Every structure is written in C-alpha cells, then in structure tokens.
Amino acid sequence: MFNIKKWLLCAVIVAFTVTPLLANETHEKSHLVVIVKDGLVSVDAENILLSEVLEEIGGKSTPSFEVKSFTTRRITASFENRPLKEAVSQLAKKNYAIVFNKQTNRLKTIFLLPEGSGTSTVILDTENDVAKIFPGPQDNEPARIDDYIKERRECLHDIIRQEPDRQVIVQISLAEFTSAKKLMNMFPESKFTISALSHGWGEMNGGYKINPSDSREKALKYLIQYHEQFLQNLLEVADDLVRESEQNPAREQSARALMQTAREQLSMAKQGIVMTYGAEIVGKADDINHFIDDPKIKLADSAGCYKEIVEIMKKDGYDPHTTFTPIRPEGNK
Amino acid sequence: MVKKILLTIATCIGLFIALMGIVSPVVAADCWKKDWAPNKGLADISQWAAINNFIWYNKPFYGTEATYEHETKTDVKYWAEGTGYWNSTLPNAYLDNPMGNFFDSEASFTVGTLSAEKIQTNTWYYTSIALRPIIQSSAIVRVGGEKGLHRKGCEYPPICQDTICFFCRDRCVAAEFTAPARVWWQK
C-alpha cells in the first residue's frame, strides 16, 4: 500500500543527502582564492573567468587597478607568492595590454584582448592624452619571440584572406642585415611603397621615415647623406668621449668601440651602403602575401593585428601612437 | 675720463655676463638625485640636430621590463622639427615622437629603449635625431631622462616604496641651456 509518510521521509533524506553533494560538486567545478600580500600574489582558481581572477587581484592590490575584458576566457591556475607582474603574465598569457598612468606612476588598467591580438605594452602620457603602444613579444625569450612571429603571420594571412585587394601597411623585420638598396629591390616600386626603413649595424639601430614625395633614389640619397653626416660627427665626438672617460679603461674602451663602429659604417656609407634590418611596406594584401612567408622575412606585423588596443585607447580618450620596433637579426652580419 | 672708465667697466661687465651665458658650466637640474639617471653626458643641440652622448657608472635598471628615454625638450614650439632620420646605440631603441613636435606645451626630441635592463655600466651611449629649423632661431632646451617600467627599487614617488615595486615612472632634467649649444653635464 502506498505509504505517503515513507515516501516523504525518503524524499527528505534524499534531499539532504544529494544537495550537499551537488553543492560540493559545484564548489569543486569552479572556485577562486586570491591572496595579495606584500606585493606577492597567490592564486588558486578553477574554471574561473580570467577577468574575474584579475579583478580580484586588482581589488586586493595596493594601489588597486582595474580590468577591462574583451574575452570570455576561463582559466584554471594555482601558484603562490608570485610578484604581481609575473602573476599577470602567467594568467593572461598572450593577449593583453598593461596600461600605466604616467601622472600617478600606477598600473592603471589591464586590457584583456581577444585571441590573436598579441601582447602590447601601453604607456599613458596623461599630460598630452597620448597612449604609446608598443606591440611586441611578451619578453625576449626565443620561444616567446617565435610564438609572436607565428601569431602575427597567421593574423596577416587572415587579413589577406578576408580582403585580398585591400591596401595594407606591414612592418617587416629581416632575417639578416641587408643594404638599403637591396631591401628596396626586394619590393618592386610598381607594387609597393616603402614608407620607412630601420637601419642598423653593430650596436647601432635607427630609423628613416621616407618623404612620400621622394623617389626611392632620392630617399636613398638623403638616408646616406644623413647617415654620413651623423657618423662623421660621432667620429669627432668620440675623441672627446675618450678624454672625458677620466682614465677609466672600460669607458675609454667603449668610446673607442663607438669610434670603430662609426668608422666602419662611414666607410660603407661612402660606398653608398647603409645596412638595414626592417622596413614599413605598403601594398595590396594579395601582393604582400607573396613575401610574408619568404625566409628572408623574419617577422611581418600589421596594425590590423593590434587594432583592438588602438580602438580601446581611442575610446578611453587617448590619441594612440604605435611604435613598432623591428626584431634585430642574430649577429652583426 | 670718468665717463670713459665707467663705460669701459659697464661694457666689460656686459661682455662678462654675455660670455657666462655661453660658456658657463651647466647646472644639472635634478638628475643628481636619481640613481637611475646617467652620470655624465654631452648634449649638442641645434636646429639641425639633437645629439646626445651619455654614460652610467652603475647599473641603473634591473628586471626584464625597463624603459629609458633620453629627452631633449623645449617649450618653444616652432624652433625645429624632426626630418625622420634618427640613430642610437641604446639597445632596442625607438624614436618616441617621430616629427618631434606639436604637443601643446612643448616640443620633444626623444629616443628611448625598451630594453633598459641591457644598458651596461661604463659604456658611452649615443642618440641622434636629424632636425630642420622652423621659425624661432634659439630656444631654451632641457636635456634629461625618463625611466619607465622597473621591477624594483623605485624610490619616487612615495607610492613605490614596496620592496617589489614596478610600473614606476620618473623623469629628471640633467641640463637646461639655450640652444644652439654644445654642453657637458654631470650628476
């Protein structure tokens, strides 16, 4: 016979038994513990939104910082007593930008970017409302640089696939130092405009922004002229640097090394040779596609691959200035 | 006779003052307080070029994320502008403000490094920026430095007193003078 009291009792027993189990299971599925003490961060997170973890850290840090997220990535992570920047780097991995407030010298915001955005460092100049953006690898570890190169290549291929006829600006880093003239010859004038060159040799690195109204011949002539002029000046100054080195052998040696580099490059410049390792190239996406996998090109980067952080900075009221620094080839030659 | 003597004395004093303006030793503004700032430097600044050489005697930066910018700034907006050419021996260098100008309050000709932790002691560093004149023929310029990200050891401002402290920016003036001029400065 149906005994309602028995069934009720069963239901109550089941309810009291299952509910804690379910609660435990829920608790085990996602939890978050964050401790910030003396600038060191400990995190125990399971299946939590990355933004939530960082917000927790930001709220407990002194000074606090905010998090603006454009991703719904969830993470599981556990570590103890890591410095704040290491903790952020470990959790956010690749797609984030750290923004510093120049006025207050504080970490202001961490932006979590969509996948594929890559890393950028952003330094805010709040006096002039400028956001200086430096896209680049997370650090100088070879593995990170390789990852960055691979990501950018994939990003560029995506851009090209989506809009093959679009004009694209690409910043390239060469696998080897190459004379400016040879670099120009790599990109036929009929298809490409070279808007800037990154020159360098020895300890030196620099740049030359080409006037759009100058022919390539004229641009090369001006580059060589400037290069000769400044190297000549450096050669003359190096003598003063030796004298001002207060008879310290290391300082004198470095002054003489500068002299040697200047002399070497001046000799090349007098033969019309300025060594380069990067350039900014403008061309049709489909034409760009033919060279980005060329082994002579170490890295090909494009503003389209970090447009999110540029847009974010604009929305925040800043004028974004992006500075792309090419990756130098290994060795001098 | 007395008038002549007085005139001579006045002329001499005037000449002396004028001469002091050109060759007087440069007074370092506040970089002497900053252990991260270079110890000594030579600034050769004109409307045609901003050339700086500088040296550290002690390692100034640690950690993997330190930036340093060596600045040449002036409040005179229409004195000179960048031509697009620059050169430096700072590691992983960049030109901060390509055409050098046009903020409301100042013109700035600055080369920085994203890898300041690679700066070596007792090594002369060099930055040069090619300029072209605009309207004003002379300007009071300030040469100095600005440090960026830093793993530890921030002493300014007070908020960065923690043992491990970073995201700490600071700047200082090494020398202030009327350009064109070639000026040695030290801490």
Image (cartoon, grey):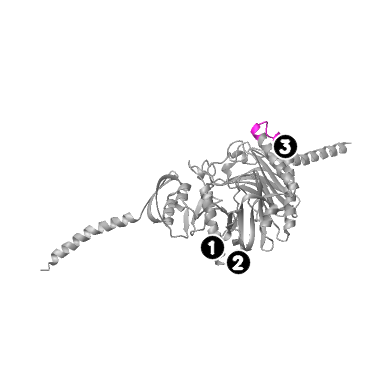
- Is A248 in the magenta? yes
Q: Classify mark 2: residues with Cα within 10 Å, few (<14), some (14-19) or many (20+).
A: few
Mark with earlier residue (3, 2):
2
Helix, strand or loop status at disc 2: loop
Disc 3 from disc 2: Cα separation: 52 Å
Where residue A16 appears, as percent x and y from the top left, is 22, 58
**Which residue has dot 3 on it?**
A240
Q: Nearer the viewer, residue B42 or A177?
A: A177
Q: Classify mark 3: residues with Cα within 10 Å, few (<14), some (14-19) or many (20+).
A: few
Residue at 55%, 65% in the rendered image? A161
Question: Would you say the residues marked 2 and 1 are in contact, meaning their CB atoms lie under 8 Å apart?
Answer: no
* Extreme residue toward the bottom, this view: A1
- What numbered label is drawn on residue A135? none
Which residues are drawn in magenta? A241-251
Q: Classify mark 1: residues with Cα within 10 Å, few (<14), some (14-19) or many (20+).
A: few
Residue type beneath disc 1: Asp
Q: Nearer the viewer, residue A179 or A237?
A: A179
Where residue B4 appears, as percent x and y from the top left, is 87, 38
Chain letter belonging to callout 3: A
Residue type beneath disc 3: Asp
- What numbered label is drawn on residue A158? 1
**Which residue has dot 2 on it?**
A166
Is A128 on the left or on the right of A90, as rendered?
A: right
Chain letter belonging to callout 2: A
Q: Nearer the viewer, residue B127 or B4?
A: B127
- Is residue A130 in sight in this rendering? no
Q: Nearer the viewer, mark 3 or mark 1?
A: 1
Residue type beneath disc 2: Arg
Is A59 on the left or on the right of A13, as rendered?
A: right
Chain letter belonging to callout 1: A
Disc 3 from disc 1: Cα separation: 53 Å
